[in-house]
Amino acid sequence: MADIGTKAPVLRSSVLTCAADQAAMQPWIDMECFQLGIGRTVCRMETIDFGSQQVVQEDQAASVQKIGATPANLCTLSYCTPNRAFRFSDQGSNHPDTVFFLPENTPFDLYVPAGTRTTYVSFDQAAFIRDARILNPRRWEAAPETIRSWTSPLKGALAADITAFSGDAARERGEHCDSTMIRDLLLQSALQVAARSEGVEDLSRAARARAFAVCSLARAYIESCAESDRLPTIVDICAATGVSERRLQYAFHEYIGMSPNAYLRLLRLNRTRAALAAACPRQTTVTRVAIQHGFLHFGRFAGDYKRIFGETPSATLAS
């Protein structure tokens, strides 16, 4: 079978105004992206698709949450600008040399605050683990089955290599490098990071893990309610998760930096925007869609919608 990694890379660079488009630009990973911060611009994003390997850089203008799962035989190595509010499932990024490894078939839940740059490279996991095991047999004897975070002195070198082969750098050079060479160089750079890394000592890890467990249960319950067109209350969520309101409040502030009620409202606003964008203006109205998603105070709904997304609901429906 031909090596699909030898095809010419596909470079895309966009300034995005919808969080759903941020997910759509990464079709190799099944995910949803929700806008939680304020702003018409969500992010500036660049992707380089080599077929069997992808490079993604995102400069987040508005805070977002990303929820999804990696497919079989795809793993990623990633990093971000240090930010105490950043969360990769139950992992944080306080150290400037932190890197994350996300293995195949693994659910993830990221909170990316505004002002954060995130970068990842995806790989064929079987090949990556095989080569990493050669470089560091003890660390890579068994493939990780969950998200891992480490610190590596070579994280900066990987970041420099990715910057050197970015679309901006290519345009400045006015020339194109061989795509196979770029792909192989980035793989070797990532393998060096994976081989020379140490565990992250994080005293808040246990608290973050407990908060993540509570909020994961809450999210699953919220999604089940959405499927049956029910709007859950805080009482419902506390009953479903088995925690008090005070503990639920604490968990959500640790999980996503806001109260459960604020988070629920933002989720419904995102769902409403997706429904308006997909609807035909001749067949529905903003009021009808808003009511379907539990918004009965139309003035407040329209004001919150424009404040978060930078446009009116009617503009979304008409686009």
Image (cartoon, rainbow, N blue to C red):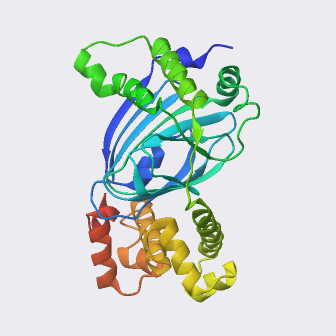
Depth check, front residue: 199 or 240: 199
- On the image, the x and y values in percent for residue 154 come to 47, 29
x 43%, y 73%: residue: 258
Q: Quadrant of residue 164?
A: top left
Q: Quadrant of residue 194?
A: top right
Relative to 278, 69 lies left or right: right
- On the image, the x and y values in percent for residue 277 come to 39, 60
Depth check, front residue: 306 or 111: 111
Give the answer, above or below, for where 136 lies relative to 46: above
x 41%, y 86%: residue: 296
Can residue 52 be seen here? The reply is: no
Relative to 75, 95 lies left or right: left
Give the answer, above or below, for where 52 lies relative to 273: above
Farthest residue, direction right? 142
Q: Quadrant of the C terminus?
A: bottom left
Can residue 150 be seen here? The reply is: yes
x 63%, y 47%: residue: 147
Give the answer, above or below, for where 81 lies relative to 206: above
- On the image, the x and y values in percent for residue 26 come to 49, 40
